[in-house]
Image (cartoon, helix red, strand yellow):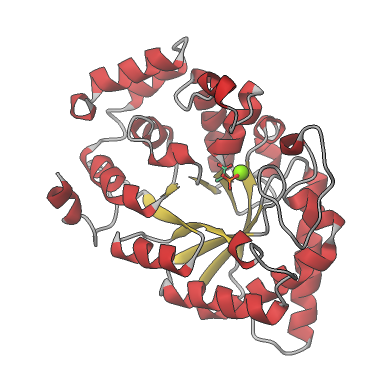
Amino acid sequence: EQEAWGAVRNQQTISADGRHFEVAANVGTLADMEDARKNGAEGIGLLRTEFLYMNQSRLPSEEEQFRAYKQFVAGMNEKRVVARTLDVGGDKRLGMVPLPSEANPYLGFRAIRIGLARPEILRPQLRALLRASVYGRLAIMFPMVATLEEFHQARAILEEERAQLSSAGIPLAQNVELGMMLEIPAVAMMADIFATEVDFFSIGSNDLIQYLFAADRGNPRVAYLYQELHPAVLRTVKRVIDAAHAEGKWVGMCGEMAGNPLAAPLLMGMGLDEFSMNSNQILQIRSLIKKMNTRQLQPLVHRALNAQSAPEVAELVRTAIPELN
Ligand code: PEP
Ligand code: MG
């Protein structure tokens, strides 16, 4: 089986009925990018920028960040690199950005909430990313956006930095896509409106599922509530994909669910455009997608959306696609 996956390393991910799905990698270091290339990633669907800030005694300068981002953007050779602005808080702490101690860190001061409150952190990061944009194909996304106002504020900061760099004569790509992580149920409910404003969504299933079930993603006592295949998750994902497609926008997923072979047929059938995962899962998911026909998956998707539980969905998928057993 490993050998069969190897054969699809340098191929595009085209389903049996001719639809292209992008299978991309989640990357947090240069070594991860090497793995992504070795495994034939069609892009970087999530560049976690936290590595630049971890184990440092001070914030990375704009220049240090620029040099780092340039390596990723150039290293992927015109394949899309979706960089996420700093996503700390929740379970991720940073020495040089002291965060308040909170009763519920996952519901507290994290991600874009910090970025908007501390523009001295967000602005240099955006400048560095924009400067790196000329070396390949960059997209930028904001983590944990909850409201349109937050998206507008973050975008306004990006536009200010872009205007300043331009007027200083610094070369910038004109085609930098701007999107957001979709990780909060309120955003899924408003996805039709957000879809008119963004270039794309990337579904962060790890956080989205914890917020849908109100179950801390790191707490083993409530881990039984963390169910990727639950119809509540599938309905939410479908709603987001349909809303984005109605506006001609693309949707990716960069949470763990994107690399789950039992979820992949459902995500394909619902029309997810991009799957971003740890590189070691790429070849398996690609070979699975290549065997499946999106039209033939429709009855399975329909049954899964109308099922009552995650185990029932798992059983439906295994029955429809025996090779997953
Ligand atoms: C997610 O929430 O699914 C995600 C990809 O972000 P992180 O796991 O870094 O919170
Ligand atoms: Mg997240």
Residue 77 % position (x, y): 40, 75
Q: Is residue 249 above or below residue 308?
A: below
Residue 25 % position (x, y): 42, 55
* Residue depicted at 18% across the width and 29% down the height: 323
* Residue depicted at 58% across the width and 30% down the height: 209
Q: Total marks drawn?
A: 0
Determine whether, in the image, residue 91 is placed left or right of residue 22.
right
Residue at the extreme top: 308
Residue 82 % position (x, y): 54, 60
Residue 293 % position (x, y): 26, 35
Q: Please identify the quadrant where the C terminus is shown.
A: top left
Q: Is residue 263 above or below residue 146?
A: above
> In the figure, residue 295 lies in which quadrant?
top left
* Residue depicted at 75% across the width and 47% down the height: 110
Q: Please identify the quadrant where the N terminus is shown.
A: top left
Determine whether, in the image, residue 117 is placed left or right of residue 191.
right
**Residue 101 vs residue 78, the one in the foreground:** 101
> In the figure, residue 108 lies in which quadrant?
top right
Q: Is residue 115 above or below residue 323?
A: below
> In the figure, residue 272 lies in which quadrant?
top left
Q: Is residue 290 above or below residue 236?
A: below
Residue at the extreme bottom: 169
**Residue 229 vs residue 51, the one in the foreground:** 51
Regarding ligand 1, which quadrant of the image does it lie in? top right
Determine whether, in the image, residue 265 is placed left or right of residue 140.
left
**Residue 6 vs residue 172, the one in the foreground:** 6
**Residue 267 vs residue 86, the one in the foreground:** 86
* Residue depicted at 61% across the width and 29% down the height: 210
